[in-house]
Image (tube, grey):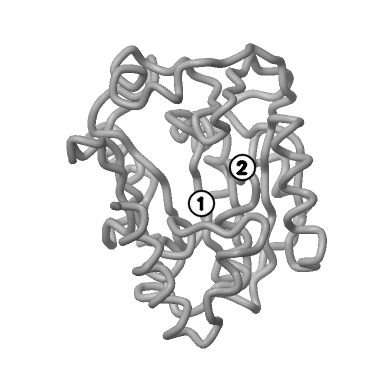
Amino acid sequence: MNILFRMADAAKVLLRSGSGIGPLLQKGGSVAATQLVHNCRHYIPQLHTILDVGANQGQFALAASRGYPAARIHAFEPVPDTFKILQRNTRHRTAITAYNFALGSTTGSLDFHSHAYSHASSALQVSALQQQLLPHTAGFRQITVPVKELDAVLDDMQLSAPVLLKLDVQGFEKEVLLGAIGSLQEIDYLLFETSFVPMYEGEPLFDEMHDFVKELGFSFVAPVGFLQSPQLQLLQMDLLYKRK
């Protein structure tokens, strides 16, 4: 029943924007991503570049391409099988470019946990707590993926401001930012998912991430999304920051 209410809310968002409910029925259509982009647009009226790190099957990239039609979107997804789906879902969107590697604080290769439930895939291992709360996230196979620092990647890109860096990398957000220290002055907005309880082994929780991004020169704007357990415990939240 909860998902039906969420779909109804997302449909209202699309209808208000004039898009109708068609995008939700297309490959890569997502209730959560549609709502997330809608909430971001309340605070960010215009974007010209979006860096979608942890693109999965293209849910956020597709929603962002509708919400910010002037934006060039760079979508990063390291898991080969998921990347193929990302490519298929975005192949008709010329503004979206997909990259099949991870981003982190090093360059080389990275041990990675690929889950059947692809949203849970991460460089970090799912915690016992997450397996208890969300049993469908438990199974995985370990693979090796290429990893690069965002600093090196952006050297080959021309970013047009305003720029949004979106991170949804399941507890690996701080590592991505550590690999982007030299480029953060080009980032106008930062959107990332953070946990209030340990969903992955070794991940930094909300307090640490909030203090860290403040030290990097960003100020908090607002929460724009959240994840609850079936028992309504607040597990994770999507937070929006702006460069000071």
Question: What is the distance, in whole Å, between disc 2 and disc 1 at their CAs?
Answer: 12 Å
Q: Position of residue 187 (x, y in %)?
A: 52, 58
SS class, disc 1: strand
Considering depth in this image, is 22 or 79 the residue closer to the camera?
22
Residue at position x 59%, y 30% from top? Answer: 104
Front disc: 2 or 1: 2
Could you tell me residue 211's position as x and y percent? 26, 39
Mark 1 Cα-neighbour bin, 10 Å: few <14, some 14–19, many ≥20: many
Give amino acid for label 2.
Answer: Asn
Left or right: 26 in relation to 168: right
Q: Which one is in front, 83 or 179?
A: 83
Which amino acid, mark 1? Lys
Quarter assignment of residue 212 = top left
Is 216 located above or below residue 125 in the figure?
below
| Residue in the foreground of this view, choosing between 50 and 187 | 50
Measuring from the top left, give residue 87's x and y in whole percent: 78, 49
* Residue at x 35% of width, y 62% of height: 244
What label sits on residue 166 in the rendered view? 1
Residue at left offset 57%, top offset 43%:
182
Q: Residue at left 52%, top 36%?
A: 119
2 or 1: tag closer to the N-terminus: 2
Q: Which residue is mark 2?
A: 56
Where's residue 168, x and y in %? 49, 42
Please give left or right for residue 149 compared with residue 184 in the image. right
